[in-house]
């Protein structure tokens, strides 16, 4: 495990990959962009570092020796100390099921190898902007049994807390603030993921699926508008 810092560094990013060339490339470009960078080459080391250093974001390779990136991601989301840590997946697998599994487990975004270092830096910046954005207003938004406290960034359903990732929370808030109006997938990508409107609309679908599951029966308030996107109903009909 190593660390590289630069003057006036800002957020800490943890790189988890067992390929030295990839690690060196990612560290160089992130450090150049002003991030404090730590590295780990195995799942157990990554989990230990994540708990100790509390990085703002983890760049996580899925093909790790012994313990897969999927297992690392599951443990990150299961631990209170790392539950809300942003995760950008790196994978050499281009098959959709692998990407879907990672997003379903709570990853915020993914890149497939080989990747552009510049795009990777932009993705990291976009995720960190998203998860650190302050609440727009300090009020409570209630839709049926769902209560969203925009000051505390918390969600409850029937007075029971619901644990959401930062991306899931922003997706729910975006739909709730525009309830009754259909939100196109491309618009949600721009609003929630800071992404260009022509890439990876499947990302939206998988996060909506996971969000509905976490909301339980109240997840039915999120309607699929076939051919367009999603809409939040004002209440159960």
Image: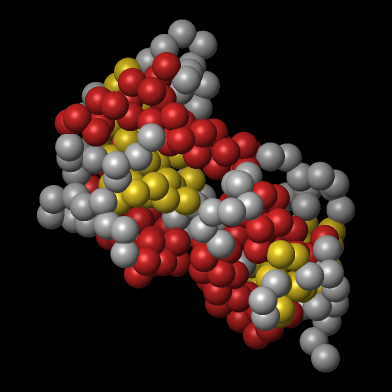
Residue nearest the observer in this picture, 116 or 160: 116
Residue 164 picture location, percent across and down: 58, 61
Position of 143 compared to 123: left or right?
right
Residue 216 picture location, percent across and down: 61, 81
Residue 52 visible within the image: no
Q: Is residue 18 above or below residue 185?
A: above
Residue 152 picture location, percent across and down: 73, 50
Residue at horizontal 71 percent and vertical 78 percent from the top: 225
* The quarter of the displayed image where residue 171 is located: bottom right
Residue at horizontal 47 percent and vertical 20 percent from the top: 33
Q: Is residue 138 above or below residue 32?
A: below
| Total count of labels | 0
Q: Name the quadrant of the N terminus.
A: top left
Q: Residue furthest top?
A: 7
* The quarter of the displayed image where residue 207 is located: bottom right
Residue nearest the observer in this picture, 78 or 235: 235
Q: Is residue 87 above or below residue 21?
A: below
Q: Name the quadrant of the C terminus.
A: bottom right
Position of 44 compared to 235: left or right?
left
Residue 176 picture location, percent across and down: 78, 65
Residue at horizontal 46 percent and vertical 8 percent from the top: 7
Position of 103 compared to 16: left or right?
right
Q: Residue furthest left?
A: 66
Residue at horizontal 38 percent and vertical 23 percent from the top: 29
């Amino acid at each position: 495990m190593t660390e590289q810092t630069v003057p006036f560094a800002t957020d800490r990013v943890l790189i988890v990959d067992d390929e030295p060339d990839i690690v060196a490339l990612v560290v160089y470009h992130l450090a150049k962009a002003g991030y404090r960078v730590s590295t780990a080459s195995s799942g157990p080391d990554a989990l230990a570092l994540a708990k100790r250093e509390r990085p703002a974001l983890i760049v996580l390779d899925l093909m790790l020796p012994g313990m897969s990136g999927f297992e690392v991601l599951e443990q990150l989301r299961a631990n209170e100390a790392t539950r809300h840590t942003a995760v950008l997946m790196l994978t050499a697998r281009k098959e959709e099921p692998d990407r879907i599994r990672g997003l379903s487990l709570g990853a915020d975004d993914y890149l497939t190898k080989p990747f552009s270092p510049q795009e990777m830096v932009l993705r990291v910046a976009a995720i960190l902007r998203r998860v650190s954005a302050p609440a727009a207003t300090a009020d409570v938004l209630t839709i049926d049994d769902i209560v969203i406290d925009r000051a505390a960034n918390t969600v409850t359903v029937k007075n029971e807390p619901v644990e959401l990732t930062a991306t899931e929370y922003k997706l729910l808030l975006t739909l709730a603030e525009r309830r009754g109006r259909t939100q196109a997938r491309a618009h949600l990508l721009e609003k929630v993921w800071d992404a260009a409107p022509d890439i990876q609309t499947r990302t939206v679908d998988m996060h909506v699926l996971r969000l509905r599951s976490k909301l339980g029966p109240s997840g039915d308030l999120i309607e699929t508008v076939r051919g367009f996107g999603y809409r939040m109903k004002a209440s159960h009909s």
